Image (cartoon, rainbow, N blue to C red):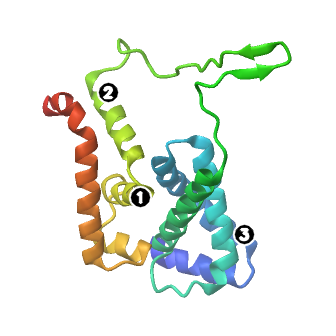
Amino acid sequence: MDRPSSDAILIERAQRGDRSAFDDLVRRYEAKAYQYAFRLTRNQEEACDVVSDAFIRVYNALHNFKGQSTFSTWLYRILTNCFLDSRKKEKNRQTVSLEANFQTLEGEIEREVEDERPSPLEETEKNEREARMQRAVAMLPEFQRAMIVMYHAEDMTYEEIAESLDLPVGTVKSRLNRARSSLRELLMKDSELFSAS
């Protein structure tokens, strides 16, 4: 069965109030949605929140979906917006330094944080390069990170990214080039490791 046309059938049924058709759409796309959200957030819980929020928005806005883009493109746009919105909320939350001591009735206790990273002996050079790349991507501004993930991890074309983010293709190309330049600068300190590949 051709996926886009079967999507159209499910969307049409869901728009008429068929809840099972909407559930089928969710089942069809939830794994890819989570994969994309996790690549943006690098956090399982946050990725789940982004996906949940996105599917709630999809459900509430499905009656407005006219099929001018594919359902997956529309979903990527909503996921990206949910991610950007979650980051705005995160910046407004009060944070506590991991270096700060924890106050109890008995006095102050030094905060201990378990380091869950694998030891250097357990990690191969290839895995180290991947970890450094992921950290560098995570340091990019959210919009640049979304573009890098869409193009390089999700294998979306310039046109698909443009449609997902409602931008001209030329803008996508120039912003993606800027994002790559930013990423390159972040990786410069690891140039010896990366030149070995």
Is 52 situated left or right of 146 in this image?
A: right
Residue located farthest toward the right when viewing the structure as drawn: 105
- What's the CA distance linking mark 1 and mark 3? 31 Å
User: What residue would you read off at disc 2?
Assistant: 128
Q: Could you tell me which residue is drawn at 25 percent across and 69 percent down?
A: 173
The one nearer the camera, 8 or 30, is: 30
Neighbour tally class for label 2: few under 14, some 14-19, many 20 plus, Cα within 10 Å: some
Residue at image point 28% right, 31% down: 129
Along the polypeptide, which appears first: circle 2 or circle 1? 2
* Residue for point 45% across, 72% down: 73
Q: Which mark is residue 120?
A: none
Q: Is residue 193 left or right of residue 62?
A: left
- Residue in the foreground of this view, choosing between 170 and 113: 113
Of the numbered discs 1 and 3, the one sitting upstream in the chain is 3
In percent of width and height, residue 111 lies at 65, 19
| In the foreground, 34 or 29 | 34
- The x and y percentages for residue 63 are 66, 84
Q: Is residue 126 above or below residue 1?
A: above
The residue identified by callout 3 is 20
1 or 3: mark nearer the eye: 1
Q: Which residue matches tag 1?
A: 146
Q: Disc 3 residue type?
A: Ser
The amino acid on which the numbered mark 2 sits, given as a three-letter code, is Glu
Q: Is residue 83 visible?
A: yes
Element under label 2? helix
Residue at 74 percent of width and 16 percent of height: 108
